[in-house]
Image (cartoon, rainbow, N blue to C red):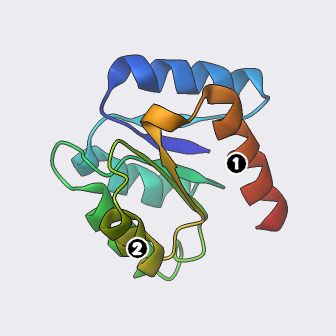
Amino acid sequence: MAIVEDDKFLAGLIVKKIRSAGYDVFLWNDGDSALPGIEQEKPDVLILDLLLEGMSGYDILKSIRNNPKLKTMPVIILSNLGSKKDIEQAQVLGINAFLVKATINLDEIIGHIDRVLKTA
């Protein structure tokens, strides 16, 4: 399990909740450090913000989908963006779920992780 989230407070809450659900988790707070970490750790599921310092979440997602070792990795977008265009752009890149931060709680995030892992 891995998270790329630049909001350190929110990232801390999500990490704590994921660990309490029994998962190990890696965390990166910016796009530039995330991709090398993802390539090294190869997490079972990636929770990815779209608006990041450095490399954007869209760019990370494109890189993952173009990497033969990572292209099937399940990705859940967790973003403040939520327009139809943003969702469609992420869906074209092969996401498993698109969650809008303002409309989701921590338990629902865990529920999405569980579902993605069951279908992966």
Q: Position of residue 68 (x, y in %)?
A: 50, 83
Number of marks: 2
Vertical order, 35 against 61 (above or below): above
Quadrant in the rendering for residue 33: top left
Type of amino acid under label 2: Glu
- Vertical position of residue 115 compared to residue 60: above or below: above
Q: Which mark is residue 60?
A: none
User: What is the CA distance from the residue labelled 1 to the residue labelled 2?
Assistant: 19 Å
**Where is mark 2, residue-wise?**
88
Q: In the figure, 61 relative to 82: above or below?
A: below
Image quadrant where one finds the N terminus:
top right
User: Measured from the top left, where is residue 54 in percent x and y?
Assistant: 15, 48
Element type where label 2 sits in the image: helix
Q: Is residue 21 visible to us here?
A: yes
Dividing the picture into quadrants, the one containing residue 17 is top right
> What residue is shown at x 55% (from left), y 26% (from top)?
14
Viewer-proximal residue among 81 and 44: 81
In which quadrant of the rendered view does residue 61 lie? bottom left
Residue 48 picture location, percent across and down: 43, 50
Q: Nearer the viewer, residue 116 or 27?
A: 116
Q: Is residue 18 visible?
A: no
Q: Tell me the kind of residue under disc 1.
A: His
Q: Which residue is mark 1?
A: 112
- Where residue 100 sits in the image (x, y, percent)? 46, 44
Q: Residue at x 84, y 59 (%)?
A: 118
> Going by the image, does 93 lie left or right of 26?
left
Q: Is residue 14 left or right of residue 112?
A: left
Specify which label sits upstream in the sequence, 1 or 2: 2
Element type at mark 1: helix
> Given the current orientation, which residue lies at the most extreme right position?
118
Give the quarter of the figure containing the C terminus: bottom right
Question: Residue at (78%, 54%) from the top-left corner?
Answer: 115
